[in-house]
Amino acid sequence: LISETLLRSSKMAERIKVYIRIRPSVSPDSRDLRSDSSTTSDDSAVSAKCNFEYTIEERKLRLRSKHYELDGIFPPSTQQSAVYDKLGRDEIETFFQGFNTTIFAYGQTGSGKSHTIFGPHENAIDAALEKERLQRVNAYGLVPRCYIAVFQRLQTKSNICKYQIDLSCVEVYNTVLRDLFNPNNSARLRIREDIKNKFFFVENLSQESVESVEEMLLFIKRIEMNRAVCSTNMNENSSRSHIILQLRLIQQSLSGETKQSLLTFVDLAGSEMVRKTGTEGLRLKEAGHINGSLSTLSRCIDGLSSKNKNNVYIPFRDSNLTKLLKVSLGGNCRTSLIVCVSGERQHKEETYSSLRFATRALCVQNQPTINKVLDAQQLHLENVRLKDEVERLQAKLNEQQPTDDLQAVLAKRESELEDKAQQIERLNGMLDDLQWKLDKSANAAAEEDNMKLKQSVSRLEIELQREVHSNAVMQQKLNDLQLSYSDMMMKQLAMENECKQDGDILKEDDVTVSLLGSQARRHANDTVLVDRDVQTEAEDDRDVDMNEDDLRLLTPPATVVTHSMCSVFSICNLFKRSR
């Protein structure tokens, strides 16, 4: 019994290999290739008639001033056997190593795709069924040649003790799946997805077991009979569908190792230009579906070849063809692409489009792996081996460090971790206390500064108010002094006039005036002790008296007496006003 568990190894990245095969020019009466050799053996003569230039040794091709470097170029004179030797032998070798392998052909209609994959579309296979003529059939394509090589390798390989070969073939016609080995089973076909392994498969597809080369050739003939083919202006046997043929090999070596691998051939229908093929009706509908599926395939190639393909949507789910080719494009497979082109000048546009497709396909990276299958016994042996390996590693670990010591070290480490955790907790508590005290002290200092500031402002306000009041008082006193001085001057003038008229009366009263003058002086001195400001005014008055004494020396006696009396009366008035 085969387990579904796949052990994949030897994983590597590998790009798709791309080859160009040039179909030779043919006469209008012979639209298909019916022999191994081409219609002309002179490649230089054919190259002169081609719409492009190419160099086989350098594997370069030039069209429209653009250069294309490929993995190989098959000129028009290339025989079918040369194509197999260049491409098929390597693929068979990797197939037996356990890799999935895919070969598919792409190109315009009538460019020789089916001829390259299967061979001529005629009853040449019937002649090959006779063993004595098997090796003389040179028109075989890649499919019969590779299958013959597979059976030959299985018969000659001494290290393979058991093997099983299964063959299946599905046709994608428009949007419908057909089972070419059992057409009555086509209605039951469904495409399902394996989420775990990330690939699509056809459910209920017939799997035919093959045991000989002759049986294999009969199945190929059945494919030719059941596939959709019609005649157009460009191809007498134009494929109207895509063919996917798979050969599954399960091989078991003498060492017990089991491998499972797939050999897939894809014969794509050719792209068509309706104005050249002249299709209409049902054939026109088929051409629309063919071009649509090829356009989806081209968009998938564009996405896979982009530098940031991880961020680009790849439309594998947009058509049944691209779903079934998902493994071959960027998956677990080694893929080779044969781009078939025509060298005739009227097909220059189609050739240019095919070369662009080939250039983009060169940038697609696959991830091929060797697929190993383990049965129940091998799984048991692998499990036992892994358990022994685990026990060996555990014993080695125990030898390096005894279990008791390890437990002691772990206990010590746990204790240290607990102590450190407690220290961290204490430090966090201390930090919180310090932060609280700091906040509290900062608040107290701020409040104290605020109080001091308020007291200073209050003191300044009081002093300011005192200064304002003192200035008001001084201003009032100054006004009073000015009024007093004005009254004094007016009275002095009036007394001078009276003194001139009553000079005699003034002489008799000299004693009285002297006494009054002395009393006035005593009262003036007392007033100075009470108010400093009054003293200042009195001093100013004394200055006035001194000036008056000086005047008396310069005037007659009557004038002197008059001035003395005026001074006495002024002092008396000032004293009264002060009291």
Image (cartoon, grey):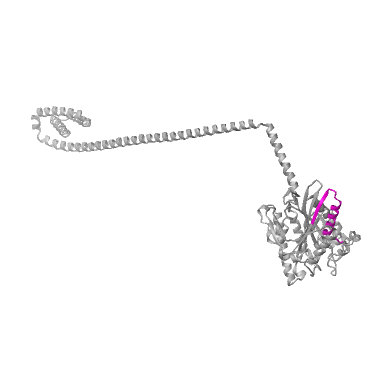
Residue 158 can be seen, yes or no? yes
Q: Is residue 401 above or below residue 140?
A: above
- Near-viewer residue (572 or 415): 415
In the image: residue 568, left or right of residue 396:
left
- Where residue 311 sits in the image (x, y, percent)? 65, 53
Magenta-colored stretch includes residue 157? yes
Identity of the residue furthest to the bottom in this view: 281
Tell me which residue sits at (27%, 36%) in the image.
471
Tell me which residue sits at (86%, 54%) in the image.
152
- Where residue 377 sits in the image (x, y, percent)? 75, 47
Magenta-colored stretch includes residue 28? no
Question: In the picture, which quadrant includes the C terminus?
Answer: top left
- Where residue 104 sits in the image (x, y, percent)? 78, 58
| Figure disc tally | 0
- Read off the magenta span: 139-165
Task: Specify the quadrant of the image occupied by residue 433.
Answer: top left
Q: Is residue 155 above or below residue 449?
A: below
Identity of the residue furthest to the right in this view: 132
- Near-viewer residue (532 or 253): 253
- Near-viewer residue (121 or 443): 121
Task: Specify the quadrant of the image occupied by residue 117.
Answer: bottom right
Tell me which residue sits at (72%, 42%) in the image.
386
In the image: residue 306, left or right of residue 222:
left
- Where residue 522 sits in the image (x, y, percent)? 15, 27
Residue 63 can be seen, yes or no? no
Q: Is residue 105 above or below residue 282?
A: above
